[in-house]
Image: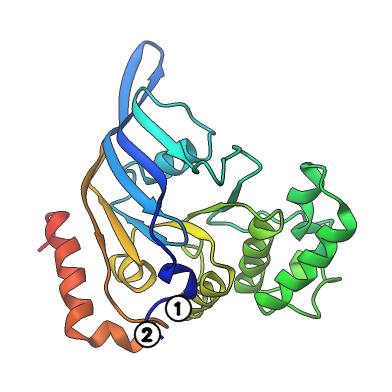
Amino acid sequence: MTMPAVASEPKRSFIRLNNVRKIYRTGGVEFVAVSDVTMNVTKGELVSLVGPSGCGKTTVLKILADLHGYDGGTVEIGDADHPFVPGRDVGMVFQQPLLLKWRTILDNVVLPAEILGQPMKAARERARDLLKLVGLEGFEAKRPYELSGGMQQRAAIARSLVHDPKVVLMDEPFGALDALTRERMNLELLRIWEESGKTILFVTHSIQEAVLMGSHCAVLTAGPARMADYFPIDLPYPRRLDMRQSSDFGAYARRIYGLLGMS
């Protein structure tokens, strides 16, 4: 297998950003957070957004999630066959799991469906299926404090999928984990992506992680964010950690280092 099944379907641009610009204004002072971001994302891709801390990666995700407006350019998501509804069609995963400590894991996972008013019987069935998908079958009745950090983040990933969003936005979801757990979660997310077929944008400041995870990679320069490059990562699937030792992997990493002025 060289790519997930969804990636072999006819290509069509599902997310389109063209010359997007974002300015924050505080006390009469303007701060340019995003100066120029352009990219087209095909349905079913996992796109890594990599760049230094504070470069505007999170701002780009918030614009896509319709949590922020923007001051220039265009943002289009969806197509004629799959119209996009902000809020309803976005799943979010943050650096911290942000699980509600008084709710069970199952009740945490169904929360987006509950907020959106979806039928709860079907949502709970889907939540159970997703917990099985992320390796948490049998933990439905546990509380967050009874799970490890990696397990809590798996629950957060299941929660992001429960309302069947068209796009999942991940903001450094493994940044707070120890190195070994982070590597396991990288492989776990790749498996979940291949099985779910979702379109995922994955923010990271780790060049190695960006290459390992992405079917494509967007490289953002130091703030204000500017798109230095957007390119496919032509490494076979399923991805493995030992690929990091390959010459092809090294070439992609060196390309990113060069774009960030770190070579």
**Contact, mark 1 vs mark 2 (Cβ under 8 Å):** yes
Residue 88 picture location, percent across and down: 66, 42
On the rendered image, what quadrant is the C terminus found in?
A: bottom left
Tell me, yes or no, if residue 247 can be seen here: yes
- 136 or 101: which is nearer to us? 136
Q: Badge 2: few (under 14), some or many (20 or more) residues near its Cα, within 10 Å?
A: few
Q: Amino acid at mark 1?
A: Glu
Q: Amino acid at mark 2?
A: Leu
- 3 or 90: which is nearer to us? 3
Q: Badge 1: few (under 14), some or many (20 or more) residues near its Cα, within 10 Å?
A: some
Left-right relation of 154 to 14? right
Residue in the picture at 63% in, 69% down: 154
Work out which residue is located at the far right of the displayed protein and give it: 121
Q: What number is the disc on residue 183?
A: 1
Residue in the picture at 54% in, 61% down: 198
Residue 36 picture location, percent across and down: 25, 35
